[in-house]
Image (cartoon, rainbow, N blue to C red):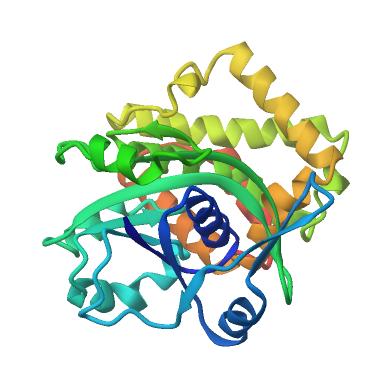
Amino acid sequence: MRILVYGAGVLGCNLARNLFRAGKNVTLLARGTWAEQLRANGLRIKDKFSPRVSVSRISVVTELSPDDLYDVIFVVMRCTQLDAIMDTLRENRTKNIVFVGNNVQARALAAALPEKNVLFAFALSAGHREADRVVSIDLKKITIGQLPGAGSNKQLIEKIFNGTKYKVVYEPNMEDYLLCHAAFVLPAAFACYKTDGNLKKLKGNTAYLNRMIDANIEGYRALRNAGHTILPKADENFESTAYRRTCLRFFKLVCATSLGKLCASDHAMNAVDEMSVLNRDMKAFLDANGADYPVWRALEREAGRYLR
């Protein structure tokens, strides 16, 4: 398969490396000095828990022309950057487009590409990019599928990821999955902004961590009351004591270790525009459905100058 990964941030680079290692014909679209670095020295990735830096000699391009044809294009860019490339995707001949990352406007995005087979995905990978390499944690798990009611893409997905080390979760309702993910991740972003990116300041602050969980539950409750499915299914009992206990353990671990920087604050601090848009869109959804979300609003205020 000919695969283009459009976007060479942390997620895009890890995706390209994993597909390349499985013998896929992968091209990575990058820009500026980063494209020059990739061409000269290869894609260099330092995994957090490995002493070595992997090097992958992946083909690099700097643009997508209308006549370029791939079996699938993975668009791995912030949701705030997508408007700038929609015409490029629309004019290109490739049929299968997969948008990877945070997005609560999935249905509108698919409608903007009516002649394409549009999928959505979320990969468990995080970290930051340095001048000559990516430093990351890559759990090699990806959730991928289409909007509810669209034709199944299960066979296509199996073909794309065959031979890779990914744990692939096929999700036929990616709209609700992404809405739920936003309801979970935004309270964590508020915590990053409250601490100026240093989540260790919240180590031992159980009261604040419980408020983060309260805000998440407010979001989940609004989604459920509006008729959406809570995904992943492991979260469907989000009002239970067991759910709160699991979340609290997770947030305590994140705040007490370097996982907080790699898994949360690195992205939040470098993607304030994305988090602001996600928060704006989620609040619009909550308001449109008459939801009550006082804890969410309080944490948002405490995030201070970052959100706009």
Residue projecting furthest to the left: 115
Residue 210 % position (x, y): 70, 30
What residue is shown at x 35% (from left), y 46% (from top)?
A: 160
What residue is shown at x 12% (from left), y 61% (from top)?
A: 114
Q: Nearer the viewer, residue 305 or 74?
A: 74
The picture quadrant where one finds residue 94 is: bottom left
Residue 150 shows in this picture? yes
Count of picture labels = 0
Position of the C terminus by quadrant: bottom right
What residue is shown at x 31% (from left), y 46% (from top)?
A: 288
Eyeballing the image, is 114 above or below 68? above
Residue projecting furthest to the front: 23
Residue 289 shows in this picture? no
Q: Is residue 290 left or right of residue 80?
A: left
Q: Nearer the viewer, residue 7 or 243?
A: 7
Position of the N terminus by quadrant: bottom left
Eyeballing the image, is 260 above or below 207? below
Residue 11 % position (x, y): 55, 57
Residue projecting furthest to the top: 241
Eyeballing the image, is 229 above or below 163? above
Residue 241 % position (x, y): 62, 12
Q: Is residue 220 left or right of residue 196?
A: left
The picture quadrant where one finds residue 135 is: bottom right
What residue is shown at x 64% (from left), y 51% (from top)?
A: 126
Residue 204 % position (x, y): 88, 33
